[in-house]
Image: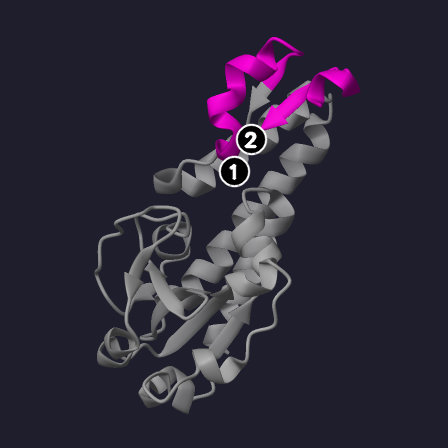
Amino acid sequence: MVSKINPDLIIVSALQAEDYEKLSSIAPTLYLGIENGDFKSSIKKNINTIGRVFQLTDQTDQINEELEQAINEASKKIASSSNKIMILLYNAGTFSTFGSDSRYGFVFNDLKAKAADDLKEEAIYHGTVVSSEYIAEKDPDVLYIIDRNSVLGNVTNRNEIENKLVQQTSAYKKNKVIYLDPDVWYLSGGGSYSTRTMIEDILKGYK
């Protein structure tokens, strides 16, 4: 399929990394993956690369400056708060949580959010499966929900997510259960637009 398009350049993320050599045989291929442990630097590096490739360095330099400023301003506000957060992926009745070693590690490492738990991820991209009891026990002040069901075009009854145990959390009682756009948080991510959107989404929990 790709060869039929006859592209001049192919850009791949981590999801297509294993196909890099095959794609490179079709056209020059650029890998713009993200290092979860160094999210901010990865983003800025990739933006710089795009600027050089398309001769748009003035624009990409400005984008990086604005992104750096947005991260710095957000991290100051978030770091000064005592709120402890939890990022959850909901998938057909199952919860998974994400921390500093995950695909959403920049929320903790760069934005300086405090985690409600110190659980180490068993799966960097899919998180660690946890129970509703676990969520209630850790009692986050803010809950961020990524509903994977909606990515597949399904409609989730929020009562499934905000069950009786989740309702025991401070997040629920304070009306701090925040639903994130799965198209940005689950499907995409790693670009300047998505990163700015993610920062704005996280800041909703600190208003």
The local crowd at label 2, few if under 14, some if 14 to 19, many if 20 or more residues have their Cα within 10 Å, is many
Q: Quadrant of residue 111?
A: bottom left
Q: Does 205 sit left or right of 51 as displayed?
A: left
Q: Say whether residue 47 is left or right of residue 104.
A: right
The answer to whether marks 1 and 2 mark residues whose Cβ atoms lie closer than 8 Å is yes
Q: Is residue 133 visible?
A: yes
Question: Residue most toward the right?
Answer: 5
Rendered view: 173 above or below 140: below
> Which region of the structure is painted magenta?
1-29
Q: Is residue 112 magenta?
A: no
* Residue 15 part of the magenta segment: yes
Q: Amino acid at mark 1?
A: Ile
Q: Residue at x 40, y 91 (%)?
A: 173
**Which residue bears the numbered disc 1?**
43
Q: Nearer the viewer, residue 189 or 27?
A: 27
Residue at left offset 36%, top offset 58%: 112
Q: Which residue is mark 2?
A: 46
Give the quarter of the image for residue 129: bottom left
Label 1 Cα neighbours within 10 Å, binned few <14 / some 14-19 / many ≥20:
many
Asked if 197 appears above or below 41 in the picture, the reply is: below
Name the disc covering residue 32, or none.
Answer: none
Which quarter of the figure is the N terminus placed in?
top right
Q: Secondary structure at mark 2?
A: helix
Residue 47 percent location from the top left of the image: 60, 33
Q: Position of residue 93 (x, y in %)?
A: 41, 71
Left or right side of 27 for 71? left
Q: Residue at x 59, y 42 (%)?
A: 191
Give the residue displayed 53% in from the left and 35% down from the top. 44
Answer whether residue 197 is visible to the viewer in this image: no
Q: Name the amino acid, label 2.
A: Asn
